[in-house]
Image (cartoon, coloured by chain):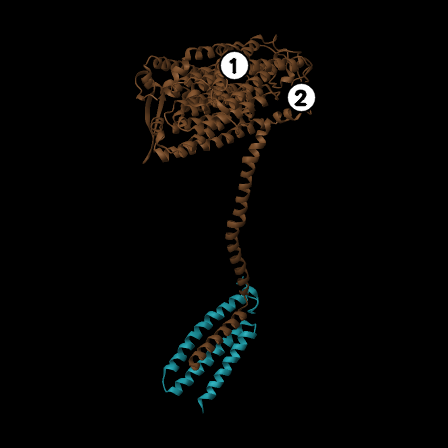
Chain colours: A brown, B cyan
Amino acid sequence: MGNVIAASGVASTAWLLLALPAFGALVLLIGGRRTDGWGHLLGVATIVLAFVWGLIEFLHATGLPAAQRVQNLHLFTWIPVNALQVDFGLRLDPLSLTFVLLITGVGGLIHIYSIGYMSHDRDRRRFFAYLNLFVASMLLLVLGNGYVTLYLGWEGVGLASYLLIGWYSDRPSAATAAKKAFLMNRVGDVGLALAIFILFAKLHTTQYTQVFAQAHTLSGGTLTAVALLLLLGACGKSGQFPLQSWLPDAMEGPTPVSALIHAATMVTAGVYLVARSNPIYDLTSSGRLLVVIIGAITLLLGAIIGCAYDDIKKVLAYSTVSQIGYMMLAVGLGPFGYALGIVHLLSHGFFKAGLFLGAGSVMHAMDDETDMRRFGALFRRMPVTAVTFGLGYLALIGFPFLSGYYSKDAIIDAAFAQGGWRGWVFGLAAALAAGLTAFYMTRLVIMTFFGPARWKDLRTADGGDYHPHEAPAVMTVPMVILAIGSVGAGAYLTLGHRLADWLTPSLGALQERTSGGSLSSGAVTALTLVLAALGVVVAILVIGRRQVPVRRPEPVAWPIRAARNDLYGNTLNETLLARPGQWLTGALVFSDRRGVDGLVNGIAKAFGGSSGRLRRLQTGFVRSYALSMLGGSILLIAALLLVRFSG
Amino acid sequence: MSPSFYLILAALLFAIGVIGVLVRRNAIVVFMCIELMLNSVNLTLVTFARVNGSLNGQVMAFFVMVVAAAEVVVGLAIIMSIFRTRRSASVDDSNLLKY
């Protein structure tokens, strides 16, 4: 890790990156209906300006010598409480600047696309306010110079995604999905918060610079605990096993939201967190191993479930889950993989955003229908969408010389390069998932763009005919740009280790595979290509050659049934987390009602009851009072006499 | 005459008063029984004053008379007002102050 220098010159104005989208969100939210007319333009303008500013920062940083590329910009003292001193500042280094460009670049394109996609929505202005809020939070997440600033952005992103997933709040399913995403993110956030607490308790600081400098003083157990808690946070945000099931449900939001949040940026926050905390993960091999295991499980899980769904957005969502599994696996490989994970993250940002925008365009044309069984033969009706979608598809399945080929292949290669059982297990899992990816994506493309036009005989939800048409230019242009990125980004970033070298000040030098490993590089490439080709061929034979039934076949064999049920991910969460939680609350409520409340109410009842009996003595009859007075007097006198005359 | 006759008479009067208070319902009669008890006590006080040859008991009896007179004034006024509102002088009828 290079030394950190104080930001100066252009870098000292980096706060503008945050301020622009935050300003946009503030104006649009406070301005209300008054800003309806031009709100979407302001929303786009702030992001485009932020992108331009990010580009300036980036070019400035590339002009600096490598030793000066990690810069710290102190803005103000945020939480000055005795021992807890948290400064609000930004860390400008190759990693954060790369993310800034991805977020504002892809985010900007999606903003532009949203102008067209949301044009029929009455609340388009509010939508852009939320998008701006999201971008501002995400920028804070990646630019913050400490874990607390990261946490602020982390929660901001969670809030924005909640608002956007639940955009169609009149649909109960959308409201539920938003709640589910929020709650499952909270599970991860608890992990992140605990990690920050431990770091503060042990190191008395939460700023990256100090934490990373002192990380080696921590004991092994503490390091592993911090690494695992950070991983829990990453799993929550990135939709990794076992917290993956919120991500497909999050597709209830408008499609640009799916593209922006659940493909290109927010879900990559977990990968960013692990990559950013690389000095901690470098020191704990068991922590890294668990990251790899989680990544491997998730990438297989996502790929298997992706094969079974008929909902175009859900297939893409599980594809995202799977691809982020690849990134997790990569960053879990430590110095061999941090940069590879970021490369795949960037190229995935391009092609998955493009795929989602393409899916949005298809939905736009097909009356918001998402069931692929009702599509077919859309190629001729919407050629631009089909071609850009096709390029994204080819990039995703790792077609030679497109983005995915460079980024994903490198990860599979690095997994095999581990050697030993790890090399075989993780390498084969990653390669197998590549084959499955090719299968489900080919299935998706065939069902959507090729084959017979099944929609011709069907009616829309309103009872009308389908009239598929190409989207307006404001939607197709971002798709074209993203398609170009899907084609070229991988080669541009990886050839000559361009990105890896650029990221070295943040992530350390990328270690090349040494001799050994379970398979040689050439064999890995060949294996991956063969598996991917096999996936494509099988998909063509199984889906392309047969008639696709419009109703989904029931019953089906158990593997498909399991995949349609998300491989029981929801059941797992429910059994492991929700049920015990409910039992616990049930037991607590019971003991509270019967124990604590019972004691208090019992005492009160005992007094109430006995005084109720006692007050019956007050009959109101004067003569009975007189009798008791007489009795009392006689008793007193008798006692007096007894004392007087007995002794 | 032996002072014990006076004391026995006083005890009898007191007992009659007590029984009267306990068994009679008419407020006026109850009141008279209370007066009877007070006067039996007065008789006792005067008897002991005579036996002991001191004036303390007789002074005490005067005090009791004064207090009794005041009490009669207040008590009869209360009974009168109760009778006016409730048309009854029975102590058992005025039993509102209870649980």
Identify the residue at horizontal 33%, vertical 12% (top origin): A63
Q: Which mark is residue A523?
A: 1
The answer to whether residue A594 shows anywhere in this view is yes
Tag in front: 2 or 1: 1
Q: Element under label 2?
A: loop
Question: Which residue type carries mark 1?
Answer: Ala
Q: Position of residue A397 (x, y in %)?
A: 54, 14
Q: Earlier in the sequence, mark 2 or mark 1?
A: 1
Q: Which chain is disc 1 placed on? A: A
Please name the residue that numbered disc 2 is placed on: A552
Question: Which residue type carries mark 2?
Answer: Arg
**Which quadrant of the rendered structure holds the N terminus of chain A?**
top left
Q: Which chain is disc 2 placed on? A: A
Residue at the farthest front position = A516
Compare residues A641 and A296 and report the one nearer the observer. A296
The answer to whether residue B98 shows anywhere in this view is no
Toward which corner of the image does residue A436 lie, by quadrant?
top right
Within-10-Å neighbours for mark 2: few <14, some 14–19, many 20+: few
Q: Element under label 1?
A: helix
